[in-house]
Every structure is written in C-alpha cells, then in structure tokens.
Image: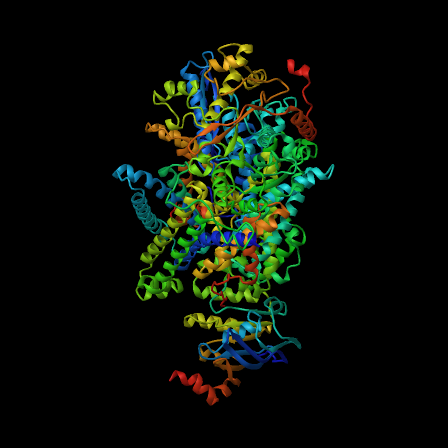
Amino acid sequence: MKLRKFALTASATAVVLSSLVAAPTVLAQAKEQFFPVLVYRTGAYAPNGTQWANGYVDYLKLVNAKGGINGVKISFEECETAYATDRGVECYERLKGKNGGATVFQPLSTGVTFALTEKAPVDKIPLITAGYGRSESQNGAVFTWNFPLLGTYWVGAEVAIQHIGKKEGGVAKLKGKKIALVYHDSPYGKEPIPVLQELGKTYGFEVQLLPVAHPGVEQKATWLQIRQQKPDYVLLWGWGVMNSTALREAQSTGYPRDKMLGIWWAGAEPDVKDVAEGAKGYSALTLQHGAEPNSKVVKEVLEQVYAKGQGTGPKDEVGQVLYMRGLLSAMLGVEGVRKAQERYGKGKVMTGEQVRWGLENLNLDQKTLDSMGFAGVMRPVQTSCLDHMGSSWVRVHTWNGSKWEFSSDWYQADDKVLRPMVMLASSKYADEKKLKPRTPEECKK
Amino acid sequence: MGFFLETLIGGLMAGMLYSLVALGFVLIFKASGVFNFAQGAMVLFAALAMARFAVWIPDWLGIGNPALANTLAFLAAGALMFVVAWLIERLVLRHLVNQEGATLLMATLGIAYVLEGVGTSLFGSDIYKIDVGMPKEPVMILEGSFEGGLLINKEDFVAALIAAVLVGLLALFFQKTATGRALRAVADDHQAAQSIGIPLNRIWVIVWCVAGVVALVAGVIWGSKLGVQFSLATVALRGLPVVILGGLTSIPGAIIGGLIIGVGEKLSEVYLGPMIGGGIEIWFAYQLALVFLLFRPQGLFGEKIIDRV
Amino acid sequence: MLYRENGQFKTSYAADQQIFPIAQDRWAIVGLLLFAFVGIPLLVDEYLLRAILIPFLILSLAALGVNILVGFCGQITLGAGAFMAVGAYAAYNFHIRIEGLPLLLSFLLGGLTAAAVGIFFGIPSLRVRGLYLAVATLAAQFFTDWVFLRVPWFTDNASSGSVSVSNLQVLGWQIATPVDKYLFCLGWLVVFALLAKNMTRSAIGRQWMAIRDMDVAAEVIGIRPLFAKLSAFAVSSFFVGTAGTLWGFIHLSSWEPAAFSVDRSFQLLFMVIIGGLGSIMGSFFGAAFIVILPIALNQFLPAFGGLFGVTISTAGVSHAELIVFGALIIFFLIKEPHGIARLWSTAKEKLRLWPFPH
Amino acid sequence: MSRQIGEVILDLKNVSLSFGGVKALTDISFDVREHEIRAIIGPNGAGKSSMLNVINGVYRPQQGDIILRGRRFSRMNPYEAAKAGISRTFQNIALFKGMNVIDNLMTGRNLKIRSNLIQQAFWWGPARREELAHRAKVEEVIDFLEIQHIRKTPVGRLPYGLQKRVDLGRALAMEPSILLLDEPMAGMNVEEKQDMCRFILDVNDQFGTTIVLIEHDMAVVMDISDRVVVLDYGKKIGDGAPDEVRANPEVITAYLGASH
C-alpha cells in the first residue's frame, strides 16, 4: 500500500509541479529576445502602474512592428507583482529563465529593486530602474548589474532644491527657509532624505519630514501640521493614490499648490486629473519627458500598433506621462540590446551578460534619439562602466488645470554634491557585502 | 489654541466618517453575530458602481443633467448592493448558520476578496471620480477670535453632516419601524426571535442591505474625497478600532467611538507624531482601542459578557 | 488493502503514544523525508525551489506557529506578520551588531525576541477574547510596521529603511545556492515541526486545547489561563518569528517592513483555516495550498482562456485570482470547516476500510 | 459501609453572592466532613450551582469565608482550589470537545506534571517518563469507569451518558480529596443513573473521596447522601441527615411541597 500511495502522491505532485514550469518553455527555441514585464495592474497602485506597463509593452510591440532589433523579434510576458516585494521576486524567478532567458528586468518598484539587487548578479541579468531604485547604484563599479538610467531619487532631490532656489532668486535665499517633505513611508519615499538633509546643512534651510503610511489615503493630520508649520515649500514624494490625496488635502487646507513640487512619480495624469482645477499650479519634476502626445514616437505607436488594433491600453492615454515613462524604459532596454549586438553580433539573441555590456556602453546622442522619434522628449544618454545612470537632465512641468505644461528650463544634477554621496554609500554597500569594486581595467574586458 | 481647535474639529469630522464605516460593522454584528470584514470591500464595490454608473447611465440614456445622472447612479448602485446582500445571504451565510464567530469572520474575508475581484473586473481598476458637487475649498471662521482664524474644511463638514443624518435615520429606523424592532429582537436572541415567527433569513438579507446602503453612502463620501480606487477597501481597517472601542453591538458606541478615535489619532499625530517620527495615527488608534479594552473588555457600550457554568 | 493496522498490537503505552502509531504511516513519512532531502534537490529546477518550495517551507513554519495559537489554543490573531517582522529584524540586529555570532544563534535569538514581544501583545488575551482579541492583535501589526519603518536603529540607519544580508554561513556551510537554501529551510522546518508535534501531544498541548475548548473548565482542573495563553503566544511567536528570519535572511535576503504587512497576517490565518485548525499536518496543507494557488492560477488561467480563444489580460488574471481565492475560502468554510487536514484523515479512514465500505 | 466519616474539612461561613444587584446566595453557612457524601438540593434557581462555583472559586462571593482544612480563604480561585484537591464535574458537561477521551482525562493530571515546556518539546527524559506514568494512571480511571472501548474517541462524538461519565473521569484523574458533582445524573435514563450511583459510591468507598453533590432526583439523594443542605432562593432552609430534612416543614413547603 505504501508504495501505491507514495506513487500516487508523487505522480500527482509531479503533475502539478511540472505544469507550473513546463508549458511555455517549449516555445523557447525560436530566435527571440525575451523581455519579462513586471507590472501591477491591480491593487492600490494600479492606476499608475497600468499606464507605465501599457507604454512599456506598446514600445516592444512597436519594435516588433518595425522588424525587431536588427531582425531579432522581441517576445515578452507580463507578470503581476501588485507592487509587493515577494510577488515581484516570484515573478522574477518565474520569468528569468523563460524563453531562452530574460534580457533585462524593470520592476517599477523600489522595494522589488532592493530584493533583486541581491539576486541579479547571481543570475547575470541587468536591472534597469529608470528614475527609481537605489540611488547609490549609479556606481557601476559596485552595482554591476543595476542601471538607474536617466536619474535617481538623489538627482530628483538635488534638482528640486535647485529649482526652488531658482524660484527664490538664488540658492543663497534658501537660508532660513523651511521645506517639508511629504513622503510615502517606504524605501521609495525615504531615498531623498539624506540629500535633502545634506543640502539643508549646506544652504541653511530646514527640512521637515512628514511620512504618510501606505497607501496614503489618510493625510489629514499631515496637512494640519503643514498648515501649522507653514513650510515655504512642500516636496511631494508619493505614489499612486497618495498623490491625489495630498493635492486634495492641500486644497482643503488652503496650502498654495504653486509652492508644491512633486518628484517625477508624483507628476502624472492619474495624480491630478480628478483634482483638476484644485491642482492647478502644482509642479512636478520630470524624468526629461512630460506628456508627449505629439512626439513622433507616439505617432508611430498609434499608426503601427493601435491602428492595427494591437494597442495594449486605451488609445487616449497613449502619450501621457507615465505611459511615456514606460515607453522610454522599454526603449532603453531595447537600445541596450541593440548596442550589445554591435559587439556580439547583429541579428543574434543577446544574453543578459551581453546586454549589460550594451547598457554600460549606451551612447544615445541627440541625432539618434531624434531619428527614433524622441525629439523633444529626451536628451542624450551616455553610460559607462562606472556611471550607470548616463544622464541627469530634469525639467519641471506644471498642471494648468487640464494638462501638464513645461515650466522650466533643463536642469542637471550637481555632480559635486551627489558624487561623494554615491561613492560613500556604494562603498559602504561593498563593505557590507564584501564585494570588490570593479577596476577600470576590468571594465574594458 | 486656534490650531488645537482646528485639529479637534478635523478629528471630529474624520471621526464621523469612521463612525459611518463602523456602523456597517455594528449593524451586521448585532443582527447576525457576523463580524463583517468585507465592509471595506463593500464600500469599494459600492463606490466603484456609483462612479461608473454616473458615467455609463448618461451614455446609455442620453441624460445631460449631472444631478439626475448622479441620482440614477446612486439608485442603481443601491440596487446593486441589494443584489449583493441577497447573494451573500443566499450563497454564504445561509450555509454557515450557527458556526463560530471565527468561521464567520473568515467567511467575510473570503467575501471581501470576491467583492474586490468582481468589483475591479466589472468596473475597472483605474482611479475614478465621484462628483456630487461637494465643496472643495476651505472657509475661514472666527478670524476675529484667533490669529489666522479657524480653517474649516467644507467638504469634511458636509460629509460629517451627511453621516450624522444617516446615523440619525438608522437610529429612527431601529426604534420606530416594525422591521427595526424585529432586527433588534433578532439581535437579542436568535432562537427566541425565530420562535415568535420572525424569519431569520429575511432579517439577514435586510440587515445586509442596510449595511450595503451604509457602505454606499460611505463610498460616495470617501470616493468624492479621495477618488474611487482600490485603497478605499482599507477604510475598513480604520473602522475596526472604532467598533472595538465603542462595542460591537452598540450604535451609539460606533458614533462615540468614531469621534474618540478621530480626535485621538489626529491629536496624537499632530502633537505626539513629530516627537517620535510621525506616521503614528494608524497604530495609535489601535493602541487607544486596546487600552480601553483592557479596562472594559466589551467596549464602551458593548453588552457585558458573563460566563455561565 | 495494504493500509491496515491489523496485527499491529501495542504492547506498551510508549508504542501507543508514538506520533505515527501505524507502521505504514511511519514508512510513508520516512519515504517522504528521503524524497524531500535527496530526491527534490536532484530533480527540481531553480524556479521551483526559489519561488515555490522555499516560500512553502518557510510559510509552513509560520503557519505552524499560527496554528499553535489559533488552532490549538483558540486565540485568534491577525498580527502574525508582526511577529515575523520582529523575528527578522531582531535576528538582523543580532547578526550585524554582535561580531562572530553564529547565524543559527542569531536566528534563535530572533525567535526568542519575537516570543518576548508575543507575550507582551498576548497580555490582552487574558482580558478579551474572540473578535476583540483579533482586533487587538492588529494593534501589534500596525505598531511593528511603524517601528521598523521609523526607528532607524533597527535598520542600522539604512537611509532607505531597507536592510539586506549576504554571505550566510552555518557551521562552515555557505548557504548560497537555492539548493542550500532549500535544504537549510527543510532541515529547520523538520526539527521545528517535530518540536511542535511533541508539544501538542504532551501536557502543554493539552493545556492549550483545554483553554481553547472550555476555558472555565480548564481553570477548574488547575490549568492557569495566564500560563497557558501566554505560553501559546510565546511558542507561536517563536515559530512565526523564526519563520520571519528565514523569510528575510534566506528567501528575500533584502527586505523592508512591507514584507511582513497585514496582508501576510491574513495570508497566514487563511493557511491554518484552510489547512485545518489544530492540526500540524494541516499547517503544511494550508501553506502549500496558499503558496501554489495564485501561481497556478496565474499560469493556468491564460492557458485555459486560450483554449476558448479568449485572451485573459494580466489584470484579468489577478482579478480572477482574487475571486477564486475568496470563493475557495468560503467553499472550504462551508463544506469542510476543519480544512484539508480533515479531508485527508477522512480519506485515510476510508482507505483503512477499503475495499469494504463499512 | 466501611468508610469512617471524619472531621470537618470544608467549612463555609456566611457566604453571600450577587450579580449586579441580583442576590444569588444570601448568608449561607454549612460544613462538609471528610469522607462523607454531602448533597445540596433545592428548586431551580435556588443557587445550588452558584454554591459549587463559590466553593471552587469560579464565582467570587462578596461576603463570607471558605475554610478549607483550617485555611481561611475570603475568596477562592479555581487554580488554588484545584491545587487544594477540589475537583468537579459540570451540569452542562464542560468537556474539551476537540480532544479524545484519553486526552481529556490526561488534562486532569495537569497539576501533577513536573516537566517543563522545553523538555516536553523535545519529548525527552522526565517529560517522556511522566507522560507514560500519567497515562498508566489515566488507564486506571478508564478501567474503573468501564470506558475502555471509547478511549480514543473524540468526546464530541460520544452519547450524553458517556460524556457525563468522562466528565467524572476527568475529575477523578485529578485524584481529588473533595469532589464536587453538579447534577451528575441529570438527563440520564434509569440504567445510566444506576451506573452513575454505583461509581459515586465506589469512589467514596474505595478512595475515601469526600463528595459534594447537587442532584434533582430526590430518591437518589436521600439514598446515597449522608447529609443534605436545602437551599431556596439563595437561602439555606434546611440542613441535616436525609430523614431530618425530609421531616423539616419549611423544606416540605418550599421544595417537596412544590411537587404536589
């Protein structure tokens, strides 16, 4: 009997287990570059996550519509993380080996990024975290697989202070001012704090920290405090419903919206559209791009993807801020592959390790970008083995009650301020993990 | 002083909304002994329905008048909540009569998941707007008495008023109508109520319907304040300390408890928060409830439990 | 026909008090353990290990802890996630602050800290019970969420509030590959499951069950509710706490308080309800069910939709997951309130009599 | 009977108990002698169960003293009572429904267990030895009550009469010196009642256990008890040997009188 029972149990287990892994691997042999897509289309952060995911997937579809990356078609698969770290890790594990191996992961969650930072080096899969993730991972010598392309939270914080300084008529005028940071109480929200405190010491302004608990729908007390303390500016570092709630509370406590400045994750349509007039005058940083419905790449997406009925999301959201962020993120990944092909063979499927080389040697100049349809959307990016960020251009846009409009010139983060902090934090990380940073020689390999 | 009053008023108004959520808990617990964890999901579901119907109904019927559209949407959402209540009784509760409290609690957690799933599949998981014309801008009063005046949030004020009216209506319903009396009888003793011919199943449907309407009103108010999206379901967690404080079986308890929790958490966040890092209001509400519990295990107005051997 | 206890006469009380009094069961368990320790590492790929088996093992341990409190002692908790967090963060602090402290010891100290905190938050159980207690435990949940976010000392002043560990070594054994991690968790779980079983079949377990079934009568017999309840809280929190350390150190290796949120607490409670309250075996069933269900749905639903030519979007799958999950919970509560463990033992009863129906 | 009735071991003095203003017991005094069978009778609501609950500390009287073997307690608590050797059964059977018969009886041995939690967790040394020793003891009780065939049955599945017997068994497993029985024969048929009577007398006879008994069945009470206390509306209206009580006019009007 024991045998039979055992056999039964074992075979039943085997069926369940194999069905969990098996199915799609069969298709893997085709010559396709596999892009896993970690998304969150449900849960508290879905309104924001969905737009990003749509942009990401649409761009991959666009590349395929245009013939792939030098003829290599892209395959992709979505996995729902619900913005939860453990589910993100499960998705990562599930997708990393699929369809011939994942090209690059973009988790769109700082928490998941922290967890994957430990795993990516083992699996040799690069991690692109455009505009989020660990700020010190800019240092490619230590964080060899992380790519916080286009900007980190520290860049955001530094530029935010630059912008406020400019509005005040010079950073010297910041002395004695009070700047409140209303932030999402998570690694994401805490990232800017060290930079703000550092700058506060330098310029002599006071930083007031006001954490908001997940998911951010309860902010009455926070805004009462703001009303009491009357900070000169409020930096909003929220995500999802926290942003619109903050704006509503600002409206109902009468805090002037034009004294509020959001990070680029707090400056998209879902954050303001329902507050509409109430959010008028509110500004947010941009990760270079804003809402770009008129850009060439968006037109291409509409023509080549949506016109054929293959669009991922609603057509009228194409070109919105977070959509563009997703699209740009996908583009960066694709360009990493393209660059890698230059070295390892055009028209071939690249491994994660090869793509890392591509991402480390990314050099998108304005001409290339313009030709890809990104004219006016973004500025050149050039990465290196030691600089995994590539550029730190930031603009500010302002909500006029019905749409976002750019309201500032280009800023660039002050490397003199950030570089030492990045080096310090990354070397602390290297010490903890007993990592030996890469030397310039190793980079050349 | 002005600021203290502002905080106090803000807390009272937030508390009134908590009472509204707590009321949903109390209604159902009183009549059926079910601790309804799905109350938050019901709020979400109702608000989603309301928000979407307010857009769909004008499309279907070609109605231009927003007030009329809102009214119709409210009625449609209300009807939908009745259906939900009926289904819950039919498919779930009927089969769990006389089970332990813990089992019923788990069942409502299951209901919560189903409602969240069905709600977001039917109505979408984007962020939606309920615009019932709530005033958004604040007003200042007593500017002569306090420096800077007292800022009153009109939206909160209106919301608190609506909540207060609803609470009043429910109290009347329970005291004055035959159905209300039957509900109270059921609450006091299931078997006795059944033996004098009160149909338990119907009573349960009614009480879940009432809770559905309460959820709808809460959903409209919160949805209009915050936008309708997934996080609305978490308002249930804000209502829990309230019922614990007020007592699971007491309607006045839900009201007073809501006010105490509302004021307590706002004052603590504003005055205590900055000293210890902020963001304390959620756990403070729970700790406050817990401290009360240690002195009065049945809550402020709950019925005393005596062990019989 | 082979599953019979005929002829296996017990000649001593010791033999009668074994964990598996039926010989076939003993053999099955030996086989299962062999398979788990030897077979699985040889057969199974990395994804299964990392995404399913390791979480399953760790959550089983946590579910075991929750079951001790809820299933055996009858004290409902909605704050299990909090004790996982306490375990994980306490172990983290022992690990980084005491140079050269063996990892195993950090883990155990993490568990002990969780036990101490568990006792503290168990105090209300002496005054309140049932639903009131359930809500009281939520206080622990939200409080620990806050503490680990807000008090930088606990996270070694990490600016982001996220902590990470690496280079784990136990007695010279480097725990790096998924197989290492799996074996470590498995070993840990086997030991602790045995301890749990022993406790539940000796005096302390009977005290817990007595308190659960009829607390007044228990007191009359000379069981002190204070000791019984608080010891259940302590043991439960210890188990849950060490599960938390494993979850943080072994599974995630980098975590933030959100890893132990109230959702986790609910999840653990579901595990014991679905698996079977008051059953050691049930904790495993429940954990397996809850770990595998969403992943399986995730994989099957699109394929299933494909059969009918329907593409089910990612969002659709997640919504369906919620619905199926909720519906299954309700289904279990209605059809089998004692969980999968009861189904299992009914099946075994049937098997014992098979092929004769009575 | 061979047993020898001894000194007073339990003495209640002027006990009063009320619940939120409702008086359950008013100024009640009586004593219990070693080895005797002492019955408490009275109509429904007379306060009989409350009396037992006061003796073993489930209820705390507002006034009065309990003197147990010369020690004065103004209020008992159940744990102290159990340690002092008082055990009891319950009117509405308070067995542990989730456990089988053996485990229910084993809980009765709880106070005698010396090993600690850690030892039990490892099933090691003293814990294991103790477990076996107590199991042997419990088996004696099982034999005594003739319930061998149901040892491993969950008590929830047992018929009422057997549950009552297991309830008694759990109390006996404590090896009490004083046994409080709350309506041990309520709801039983004649045969079951006879069995139960036999067990009570045997316990009293073989182990010398003092028994305090509440019972409705007058015939049984008058048959087996040595002395009887009569309560009515929380007051004591009679006390003495069965025959004396039977002759007490106040008792006849209040209690026996009620039956005609």
x and y percentages locating residue A12 in the rendered image: 45, 34
Q: Position of residue A178 (x, y in %)?
A: 61, 39
> In the displayed structure, does residue A275 sit left or right of residue C172?
left
**Which quadrant holds the C terminus of chain A?**
top right
**Of residues A43 and A407, the one drawn nearer to the viewer in this rendering:** A407
Specify the farthest residue to the right.
C99
Counting from the top left corner in percent of width and height, residue D39 is at 52, 78
Report which quarter residue B121 is drawn in: top left
Residue B195 shows up from this direction: yes
User: Does D7 sit above or below residue C109?
Assistant: below
B162 or A174, nearer to the observer: A174
Q: Is residue C134 above or below residue A216?
A: below
Up/down of B223 relative to A61, above or below: below
* Number of residue marks: 0
Which residue lies most toward the front here? B144
Q: Quadrant of residue A197?
A: top right
Q: Coloring scheme of the render?
A: rainbow
User: Residue B194 placed where, x, y %?
Assistant: 33, 63
In terms of depth relative to the viewer, which is nearer, A206 or C8? A206
Residue D149 visible here: no
